[in-house]
Image (cartoon, rainbow, N blue to C red):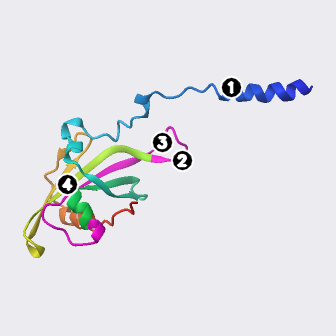
Amino acid sequence: MKAIYIVFPALILLSAACSTQPNGSQLINKDASLPSSFNFSKMGLKVISTAINKKNATMCTLYGNELALKTAIAGNAPQPGEVLAMITWKQKEDEHWFGAKIPGELLSLEIIKTTGGQFENIKANYQRYEGKLLTLSNDTTGNEKSMRYIFAQQPSVMP
């Protein structure tokens, strides 16, 4: 009888230890990946902030060049030469971590590039790319609202 108390837990531990590990390709979130033809990584942008919209089940990350990051941290108005990019994804359940949500389907990429002189003379060039293939959108409805939202983002606290 005492052998059962020792063997049974040992069998349970042994069977639990024999789970298969996912290979590296299963851990890459291909739904959230940007097309390689877009060359986003070559832009050299850094994360400024992230946001989650629970109502729409979306998440986004705001990236910026070095000048945009410094401006956001200092809380200053936009300056010429800034590049900001906001990527928005649909949320999905993480298959590997219970209860976690991760980026799913790629929804949009919005890019703002500022040019011009100081203060009131700053111009912002706004482009919106949509869908998995990041097709340039010609619809200008809501562009001003989107730019205000992007410029209003507070930087994440970074060590």
Classify residue 1 by image quadrant: top right
In the rendered structure, which disc, 1 or 4, sits on the residue that comes first in sequence? 1
Q: Distance between the residues labelled 1 and 4?
A: 51 Å
Quadrant location, the C terminus: bottom left
Residue count near mark 2 (Cα–Cα under 10 Å), binned few <14, some 14–19, many ≥20: few
Alpha carbon separation for disc pair 2 and 4: 32 Å
Callout 1 environment at 10 Å: few (<14), some (14 to 19), or many (20+)? few
- Determine the residue positioned at 24% across, 72% down: 76
How far apart marks 4 and 3 lie (CA) works out to 28 Å
Q: Who comes first in sequence, dot 3 or dot 1? A: 1
Label annotation for residue 111: 4
Q: Are marks 1 and 4 in contact (CB under 8 Å)?
A: no
Which mark is nearer the camera, 3 or 1? 1
Report the side of 33 relative to 98 (left or right). Answer: left
Q: Which residues lie in the magenta part?
A: 72-101
Look at 81% across and 24% down and name the residue there. Answer: 7
Residue at label 1?
15
